[in-house]
Structures are given as C-alpha cells and as structure tokens.
Image (cartoon, grey):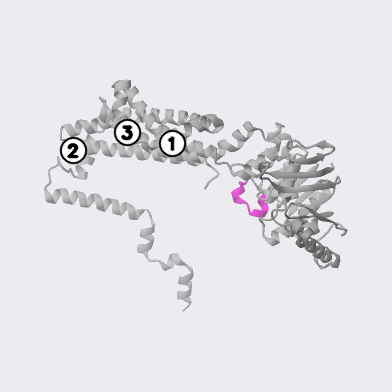
Amino acid sequence: MRIELVNVEKRFGSQDRSTLAVSDVSLTIERGSFVSLCGPSGCGKSTLLSMVLGLQSPTGGEIRIGGKTVTAPSTKIGTVFQDASLMPWRTVLSNILYPIELRRLPKKQFEDRARELLELTNLEKFADHYPAELSGGMRQRVAICRALIGDPDILLMDEPFSALDALTRDEISVELQSIWSKHNKTVLFVTHSIREAVFLSDRVVVMGLTPGRIVEEFEIDLDRPRTLAIETHPRFNFLIHEVRESISRGRKPLDIRKAG
Amino acid sequence: MSEMKAGTFDTRSDGSLWQSFVASPLWPATVFVALLGAWEAYVRISGILPIILPAPSDVAVYMWEQRNKLLLNAWPTLYQCLLGFLLAVVGGILIAVLLTQFTTIRRGLYPIVVGIALIPKISVAPLFTLWFGAGSVSRVSLVFFVAFFPMVVSPASGLMSVDSSLLKMARAFGATRSQIFWTLRVPSALPYIVDGMKVAMSLAVIGIIVAEFVTSDSGLGYLIVFATGLLDTTMMLAAVVTLSIIGLALYFAIEFIGKAIVYWEK
C-alpha cells in the first residue's frame, strides 16, 4: 500500500502560543519500498510517524494510506517502537498474538504463523519464555514478530534498534532486510543512525529543525541483498557522507538561513 | 603460593565456618533462643513475681495445657478478621476502579479518600459499638474500615501506573478503552494490589484486637482484657503469642498468594 503525505503540518499548543513541530511535509512512499526518515532530535520525525499511525492527527494537510485518509490506527499497519514494549506478564508467544487478540480473531489460527515468525527471527526456542528472560536484541525481535503477525501491508518503525548495542544492531538490520524482501512490506523507518538508514533503505529522507521539515531526499541505488561487507563499498560511504552533510545543513533554522 | 591464589578466587572456602554460620538462618534462630534464655534466667534468678513477668517456659506450658481455650478464642478473632479483610479487598478494589476510570469521581473523591487514609482510624472504634451494637457486625465493620483505605489507594495507583510505552503500543494496534483496561491496567495493578493486601492485613489484625478490647465476649482480644483483669499475666502473654502466630501466618499466606498472582516478577 502506498503512503501519501500532502502538505502535512502539526502544531502543538494553543492558537496564540503554538509551536510548529512539522511544517509542510509532502512525501510519497510507494508500495513495497523501504524509506527512512533521518534527522536530529526534535525534527518531528517521530511526530510524523505517530500521525501516519493515526495516534495523532495533523493540524494541516492530509495523510492517505492506500488512498484513504488516516483517522485512527489501522490493522494494515504493524508498528515497532524504540522500546520493545512487551508485556512482562505474557510469554513471548502471547505477546506476539496480542494484536490478534485485540482484533478478536481466533488466536489458535495464528499460532502457527507466530511460530513461523519466531523461526524467522531465530527465537523458536523462546516461545514460552517471559520477556525478562530475553536480551534486548531478542525482545526487539519479538516486537518485530508482533508487528508482522497480522500480516500488515505497512511496517512503521520508530528508532527500533536505538537501544541495542552496535553488534546486535548490525545483525538485526541484516535480518530486517531479509524479512522485508521476503514479505514485500512497505516500510517507513525512523532512525538517528545514518549508516543504518543508508544500509536498509531505498530512499533516505533527511529532516531538519525549526520547524521540522524535509531538507533533502536521497535515492540509495546500492544493489540488494546488501551484506555488512557493503561498508567497504565507496558508493555506500559516499552516500553516508552526503546524508551527513545534508543533516548538518538541516540543523540551521529556516529564517536564519534566509537572513544569512 | 598457589593455594593462596585459589583461596582469593573462591570466597566461600576463604570464609571460616563462623562466617558461613552467620550467613545462614541458624544465626538469627540462635539469637532468638539466646534472648528467650536470658529472659528465662532473669525471671529465675531475680525471683520477679509471675504477675509482673512470667518466664517464657511458663507461657509455653500454659499454652500447651490451655490449648483448647486458646484455639476456641482464636477462631472468632481469625474469622472476623478475615471477613473484614476480604470485604475491604473487594470493596477497595471496586472503589479504586471507579476512582480511576471516571474523572468526575476521581476529582471529587480521591483527595478525600487519601485524607481519610491518613487519619488514625482505630480512634473511632467506640463509635462503631454505638452504631452497630456489641455484636460481631461492629467488629467486622471496624476491621473493614481500617483495612479499606490501603485497599483503595494502592490498587488505584496501580491502575494508573501503566507503562506509557505499553499504552502507546496498545493504541497503535487499535486497542479500545476496555481492552486497555483488561489487558494492561488490571495486570499492571496486580503487584500494587498485593502490596495493598499486605498493609491491609496487618491493619486488619490490629483492628480486630482493638474491636475485641472495646466489646466482645470471646476472642483473643477479649482473652487479653480478661487476663489483665485477673492479673493473670501468663494467660495474657499466651493470648498475645497465639495472636502473633495468627498474624504471621496470615502475612505469609498473602506473601504466598502474592507470588502466585505476580508470577512474572522474581
């Protein structure tokens, strides 16, 4: 499903004392593509994601998913947050089946699918464990399984790997790429990590500060499937460099740049 | 040289027998027995009157010989205490749900509930006799009254303590308000409910004893007042020990039930 953002704006606070968190963002994410939002803290990337999710509504413009305006959370979207957000009183399997339970679908029918997803993320032995018994990387993998259980067309990921150590992060990025290519999902991925964004994406959208806005977009024309060996690829490093430059340009507030 | 190295790596074999004894539960048990022994020796040597302070062995012998009387009086204390406690648990949790789920009720009532929770409620015990008579209704009511407030405040804070990232996750997956209540709020509140039950239980035991002091014709509180009147300090201490055993048993019962309810916390 295609995600369309048309002149999206988000203001917080009352009329006379509002702050502009997101200003005039227009973006189209084609079906099956992997797009990353990258930018400094406070650039509105998480707010934007929250609006695509239907948890917040834009104060201007429109967000459409598959041609329909977003008004509330949709079952066509699976989400992974920065925090794995697993319920400590439920087993791994029961956590994964939570979205199914919320939709009042028969859980038994989805158990096989849950076990397949656990196998895909190398967690098949942990179905009956509690989250407290897992490492941070394993918990985040469970959160990915939970996002995929209802077979959504779209995967929204809000800095999903930022709490993980560098080695686990690399490992799980490679896994995510293979899940994405196998299941043909549309992915919108929010991250602080330029390297991660370039590694995973078809397109990296750089966002800037004051107000939160799109600064620049980069097509990532590296061959797939990508492996960690891509680090030695000059094009990979060039793209990282370009994105980094673009992010530092986006740190400067709009009006100061106009004045200068 | 090599032996010394091995010793520094293995702290257990490095420690003496004495240190491992102090670390074991045998140590506090020994101290307990020693304190009882000191009490016993003091009574024997000083020849102090048993009316003032009986020896622990006298209390133990009395408890064995009079076990029927003690058990007969322990029963009303135990069941009235448990009845009041259970009513407080059910009533408290219901009010906690109302308080947390309806803003209007919370705004109006919660400050009042917290305020009353701070009052020493035992002080109104004589009033309960006035209202409910001298029977068990008055005693159960007092137990309910003292145990009720921790059973409102604790579950209420539990119901409001849901992890914000879990809330966001549930909403993102389309959870309704009632689904959030049953799948997130209730489980999050369980550890708080268990904590509230521990506080409520220790207050309930105090409540039933005070109620029996004020008015009763049986029960351990009655026995304590009765023994004091007869200057039978041995009987009085025997009742106190019986009461303590009941109190400890109830506390550990809740601890045990709590571990089963909050199975995911270790």
**In the shown orientation, is residue B50 left or right of residue A89?**
left
Residue A1 pos. (x, y %): 84, 41
Label 1 sits on what residue type?
A: Val
Magenta residues, dominant SS class = helix
Q: Which mark is residue B114?
A: 1
Question: Label 1, label 3: how many angstroms apart (C-alpha)?
Answer: 16 Å
Q: Nearer the viewer, mark 3 or mark 2?
A: 3
**In the shown orientation, is residue A167 left or right of residue B261?**
right
Label 2 sits on what residue type?
A: Thr
Image point 19% across, 38% down: which residue?
A: B234
Q: Which mark is residue B233?
A: 2
Kindly identify which chain the residue marked by label 1 belongs to: B
Q: Are marks 2 and 1 on the same chain?
A: yes
Which span is picked out in magenta? Answer: A129-139
Among the two numbered marks 2 and 1 on one chain, the one whose residue lies closer to the N terminus? 1
Q: Where is mark 3, residue-wise?
A: B122
Residue B59 visible in the snapshot: yes
